[in-house]
Amino acid sequence: MALIQYLTRIQFEPGAIGLLPDELRLLGVSRPLIVTDRGIVAAGLLADVLAKGGLADDTAVFDETPENPTESAALAAVERFHAAGCDSIVALGGGSALDLGKAVALLATHPGPLEQYAVILGGLDRISADKPPVIAIPTTAGTGSEVGRAALLTLDDGRKLGFISPHMIPNVALCDPELTLGLPAYLTAATGMDAVTHCIETFLSPRYNPVADAIALDGLGRAMRWLEVATRDGGNKEARQEMMMAALQGGLTFQKGLGAVHSLSHPLGGLKALKLHHGTLNAVLLPAVLRFNAQGEGAADKFSRLKQAMGLEEKADLPQALADLSHRLGLPARLGEMGVTADCFAEVVQGAVNDHSTASNGRPIAADDFTRILHESL
Ligand SMILES: [Zn+2]
């Protein structure tokens, strides 16, 4: 259906996993390590990819991706990669498996410790192109990680850090909307709200990139038209395809940088005791961050362009419209409903101030603002 070359090579079509043998051949590799998780295996998607992707039954697999990817999981997978004599990575799953696969490719050739490659610790210059190739196959429509330059990992000491470089972008993204047909309603909604948040935050980022802006607005409009349909009617192929495209579009805009929603959802997602879902966190935080951003310079014009793209009236209240959407999707409205209490706020604010997304928020933001937003969202 579509071969798109923008940032990387993207094959987008129902049944795209059938192109896996060709794509491996084009990359000159033949022994991939499949990085995935137990849920994907249980759902039969791994078997599907092995069969339709023309891979042998004894293909090396690492299926222990945790809910939020960790340093220790990455190290365990790298060990599997070397032990099985692998020459490439096929990352199959939601954002966690894709990010873990990208980190495994990094650590396969870059000496540890992992920490030194974190972007806020000067890692950008330490990540070279000398890495095994990665083919990313998303099984959710939200993360955009299949075309993103970042992998988010929680280090053993609890910090959730971004590992970012153009060399981290997967060599190929195989986007096959049929892989999302069995995704439960709740995950469809939560991952879909991640895509919505990517489009909104990158559009509001002050960095000049009209091309990415256009993609963000188109992706946002697409998600607004199809997210509720895909959530209500998971078997609707058109809705699944349009949501996978919206998520891809969100990922194609990451080069502008995200904003304060992600600054906060990263450290919240790193809280070990709670295991909070990234997309759900974003859906909950989005209204309060937008109310903060609304007071920024030039926000009125940008907000009206967002509303236009979403099919809302000019007089509509954008933060409220997004809160209403989350409500219709059955997502929680408050952090408290997710088990978050205010005693973690000091730690979360510290993480948010240091997060790589903070610099590109639509409006300059400081620790006090983050604290207010957290209380408003509690
Ligand atoms: Zn996200």
Image: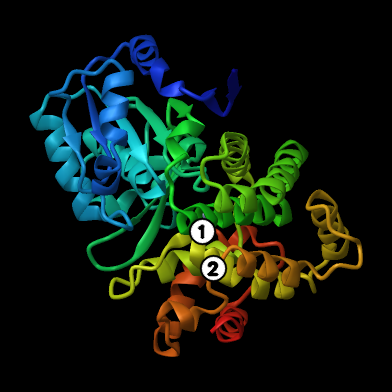
Seen in the picture, residue 226 relative to 3 is either above or below; the reply is below
Q: Amino acid at mark 1?
A: Ala
Tag 1's secondary structure? helix
**Residue 109 position within the rendered picture, expressed as x and y whole percent measured from the top left:** 24, 32
Quarter of the view holding residue 238: top right
The residues tagged by marks 2 and 1 sit, at their Cα atoms, a distance apart of 7 Å
Q: Nearer the viewer, residue 246 or 201?
A: 246
Seen in the picture, residue 114 relative to 15 is either above or below; the reply is below
Name the N-terminal-most of marks 2 and 1: 1
Q: Residue at x 33, y 68 (%)?
A: 275
The residue lying furthest to the left in this view is: 83
Q: Residue at x 26, y 39 (%)?
A: 104
Q: Quadrant of the N terminus?
A: top right
Regarding residue 132, the answer to whether it shows in the image is no
On the picture, is 228 further left or further right than 121?
right
On the picture, is 5 further left or further right than 68?
right
Name the residue carrying label 2: 331
Name the residue carrying label 1: 190
Q: Are marks 2 and 1 in contact (CB under 8 Å)?
A: yes
Q: Residue at x 45, y 64 (%)?
A: 266
Q: Amino acid at mark 2?
A: Leu
Q: Nearer the viewer, residue 275 or 253?
A: 275
**Residue 327 position within the rendered picture, expressed as x and y whole percent measured from the top left:** 62, 70
Q: Nearer the viewer, residue 254 or 312?
A: 312
The residue lying furthest to the right in this view is: 314
Regarding residue 100, the answer to whether it shows in the image is yes
